[in-house]
Amino acid sequence: MFRKFFLASAFFVLLASGSLLQSQDYSLTMSIGNASGNLGNKKGLNNGEIFNSFGAGFQTTTGNWLLGVNFRQYSGINWVVSTIPHTNSSGTAVSAAGTYENRMRKSDALGLDLNIGYMVNLGLPNPYYTYVGARVQRYNFRQVDLGSREVWSSASTLTSSSAITDNFQSTKINFNPMIGVGYNFNERYFGQLNLISSTFAFSRLSASGMITELSLGIKF
């Protein structure tokens, strides 16, 4: 993953410094973000926590265009999927025969995204600026389940027990619209607030929501 980030960053720097973009400047950016909607609940990527995503990358501007590439991670939390309904504290009985599980789950996603934005004039005074665009993201989604499974042939007879270790991973490319507003603190430092209507479409997670990101950039 870090090798891919290095190659993408190297390509970006070459592109930004070449005649293709005739770049005015390029910057190092760092960001934190928050997911809402289905992405923001425990079955998505967090449980209502704030600032569950972290990103770092590069951005360049040429004319009214913004172009950025980032390595980003969305950190989920452990949550209880199911528990075994023992009817006593010693765990030697259940209410009825069946198969029961103690299952904990944690989901996260990490990968690369490419941001393309075009600055539009919405009447805000300098040093503010606004832009609209899109994010192309290639994320690796991971879902790890841990726990135990018990099979009961009757309410008091445990037939078998086993450990649960399920590590699922999937990688996909998603395309999402983006709007943002920026503020130039001075000639070198700037901040940006991005809103991305995001969809994560994996076989074990199909969720959508709003990603709110706050980033700090340093031009060099």
Image (cartoon, rainbow, N blue to C red):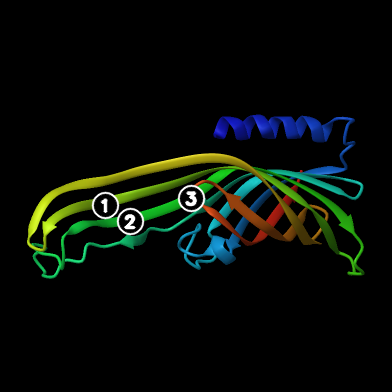
Q: Kindly identify which residue carries mark 2.
A: 104
Residue bearing the label numbered 3: 108
Determine whether label 2 and label 3 are within 8 Å by CB. Answer: no
Residue 31's image quarter? bottom right
159 relative to 165 in the view: left or right: left
Of mark 3 and mark 1, the one earlier in the sequence is: 3
Tell me how far mark 1 sits from mark 2, CA to CA.
6 Å
Give the residue displayed 60% in from the left and 57% down from the top. 32
Q: Is residue 17 above or below residue 217?
A: above
Foreground pick, 40 / 14: 40
- Judged by depth in the image, the label closer to the viewer, 2 or 3, is 2
Q: Could you say which disc has been placed on residue 147 in the image?
A: 1
Which amino acid type is shown beneath numbered disc 1? Answer: Gly
x and y, in percent, of residue 14 in the image:
78, 29
Quick check: can you spot residue 34? yes
In-image side of 45 versus 6 (left or right): left
Looking at the picture, how far across and down is residue 28, in whole percent?
Answer: 70, 45
What's the CA distance linking mark 3 and mark 1? 18 Å
Q: Taking 14 as reference, is 210 left or right?
A: left
SS for dot 2: strand
Separation (CA) of disc 2 from disc 3 = 14 Å
- Name the residue at 81% across, 36% down: 16
Badge 2 crowding class, 10 Å Cα cut-off, few under 14, some 14 to 19, many 20 or more, is some
Q: Residue at x 81, y 59 (%)?
A: 186
Q: Locate the N terminus and report the quarter of the image it occupies.
A: top right
Residue at 68% of width from left, 35% of height from top? 9
- Badge 1 marks a residue whose secondary structure is strand
178 is higher (above) or lower (below) than 171: below
Callout 3 amino acid: Asp
Horizontal and vertical percent for residue 168?
A: 42, 42
